[in-house]
Image (cartoon, rainbow, N blue to C red):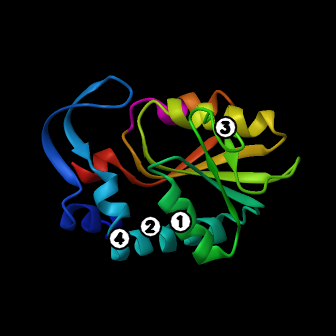
Amino acid sequence: MSKMSQALTNCGALQFGEFTLASGAKSSYYIDIKKASTNPEVLRLIAKLMAENLRNSGLKVDRIAGVVLGSVPLAAALALETGIPYVMIRKEKKDHGTGKLIEGDLNIGDKVLVVEDVITSAGSSITAIETLRREGAVVENVYSVIDRESGGADNLKQIGVSLTPLVRASELL
């Protein structure tokens, strides 16, 4: 079992029962990634492993992006680990303040790495990528803590994005 799988199991993030996922799909297990990302030791491990993947891949990015709410701690932790600034992507515009979908500095042409907690169908990632691309960002990579292996990687590939998970569901179960 990988360090990440072990950490997710140890912190109680892996749960069994009957669950409905954000995608609407039913599942016999659930990964409560908020339980993991609010635990400083597990969050630090996630950031270290993602930073290691980034270094080993040779990928150069200008920004890290996290989707509000679940992926923002991951983006912040990875930013602290790498020194790369991050942005937060809202799912919908607020009717107060600036009303922006992207919080933080983003320049046209910036290469952006999207970080996600759990990828199932990758629907929320694809929406975030479309938001970033509309603002002129270049997005070709998503890093996730978990890939549930439920079509998300293929859906991302169809829009020219590759997925790099720290753990695949098959490794956890």
- Lower position in the chain sequence, tag 3 or tag 4: 4
Q: Which residues are magenta?
A: 149-154
- Residue that badge 2 annotates: 46
Residue 42, horizontal then vertical, whole percent: 35, 70
Q: Which mark is residue 42?
A: 4
- Residue that badge 1 annotates: 50
In the rendered structure, which amino acid carries the disc numbered 4? Val
Are there few (<14), some (14-19), or many (20+) residues within 10 Å of tag 4? many
Membership of 83 in magenta stretch = no
Residue 109, horizontal then vertical, whole percent: 88, 48
- Name of the residue lying farthest toward the right: 108
Q: Are marks 2 and 1 in contact (CB under 8 Å)?
A: yes
Query: Relative to 85, does residue 108 appear above or below in the rendering?
Result: above
Q: Rounded to the nearest whole Å, what is the CA distance between mark 1 and mark 4?
A: 12 Å
Q: Rounded to the nearest whole Å, what is the CA distance between mark 1 and mark 3?
A: 19 Å
Tell which tag, 1 or 4, sits nearer the viewer: 4
Q: Are marks 3 and 2 in contact (CB under 8 Å)?
A: no
- Residue that badge 3 annotates: 129
- Lower position in the chain sequence, tag 1 or tag 3: 1
Residue 116, horizontal then vertical, whole percent: 50, 49
- Lower position in the chain sequence, tag 1 or tag 4: 4
Q: Secondary structure at mark 2?
A: helix
